Amino acid sequence: MSNQAAKGPLQGLRVIEMAGLGPAPFCGRLLADMGADVIVIERPAALRGLNTGNAINRGKRSICLDLKSALGLQAAKTLINGASALIEGYRPGVMEHLCLAPAIFEVSNPQLVFGRVTGWGQTGPLAQAPGHDINFVALSGVSTIASRAGAAPSLPATLIGDMAGGAMFLAFGLLCAILEAQRSGRGQVVDAAMIDGVSALSGLIHSMRGSGMWPATPEQNLFLHNSPFYDSFECADGRYITLGALEPKFYREMLRLLELSDVDPARQYDAAQWPSLRARVADRIKSKTRTQWCELLEGSDACFAPVLTLDEAAEHPHNRWRGNFVEVMGELQAAAAPRFSRSQARPPQAGPLPGQHSRELLLELGFNLEQIKQMAPA
């Protein structure tokens, strides 16, 4: 399916993406999934990489340009001038060094939304410091709520900082700024810092802290894997299940199904009894296999789910019914989200090879064959 024929709520929106790693290309994929015409500008060195399409670039078009050459830079500027938004994930100052700073397009494309995603932001004492997902989450304070008392924090790789705090907030910021530009006629820079995004994601926790619902003592905090009703538990076969019976009615059902009839449900939030009761729950869970617990608890009011591997998740009946995973050229991928009643996302497709659409796009931009030949990487 070509980009022109693609469906989705963002059909007709053109976005230029400067090739990179992590949150910037994932933001581009989110937009491409929803029908936007996302064009990735790759460096010539990309042609010497693996000759396979990258799933993070599914639904996009790819052009290879040497931005150090006059023609390559001209082509990049022409692409950007015809777009609603640009995505870049470089350190502050790199786009300025490439002569592609936001100010350059204020006259030629006044409604351009310039999306910039970094770990620490465009300004501040750490703006030029390197870092990765684990660092940004740590400085936001969120790492401290991802561990048991006395244990080191443990986070799912790349999900919190890069994807949630970075890519998702960049996509949200871009679309907000594009809507505003349609009213004002003026574009702007979106400074999506991963540390800002993670901090914003912790808004509910800060609200709970402010209202006294987030105990300062870890042993009394039911979200920090100390309670008998909100945690992961090992089964007889070494696999795990989760229980999340926070509300009293769900807690009562959990106790009933676990055959713990002697436990007083009215004392659910009495942290003093948690250690002994948690040990009893753990012993009970370890008496059956994960499959047996699924047969007993799945779909019940006990707030239950098994801990699945990535491969198992793709085969779970609920995920299969929802179509949450798809196979593209033999590769398992997550499907686009969210879902719409009319403007469904485009069907997932293989990502383009680096520079796959260079000739096509350069012709669209009005370059002649001799100029295109000159721009071909050596």
Image: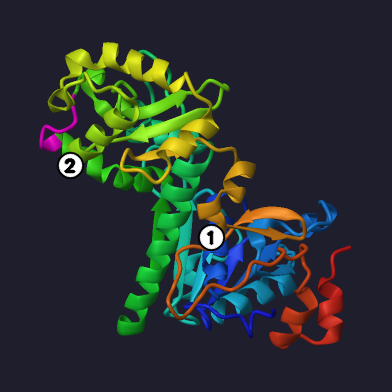
Find out whether the residues at labels 2 and 1 contact each other: C-beta distance under 8 Å: no
Q: Measuring 42% from the left and 28% from the top, which residue is drawn there?
A: 232
Quadrant for the N terminus, please. Answer: bottom right
x, y percentage for residue 283? 41, 15
Which tag, 2 or 1, sits closer to the chain's start?
2
The amino acid type of the residue labelled 1 equals Trp
Q: Would residue 242 be found to the left or right of residue 323 on screen?
A: left
* Residue 20 in sight here: yes
Q: Which residue is mark 2?
A: 207
What's drawn in magenta, residue-wise?
210-215
Quadrant for the C terminus, please. Answer: bottom right
Closer to the camera in the image, 214 or 244: 244
Q: Measuring 43% from the left and 80% from the top, which residue is drawn there?
A: 110
Closer to the camera in the image, 334 or 322: 322
**275 shown above or below 229:** above
**How was this image coloured?**
rainbow
Most common secondary structure along the magenta stretch: loop
- Label 2 to label 1: alpha-carbon separation: 36 Å
Label number found at residue 321:
1
Closer to the camera in the image, 171 or 292: 292
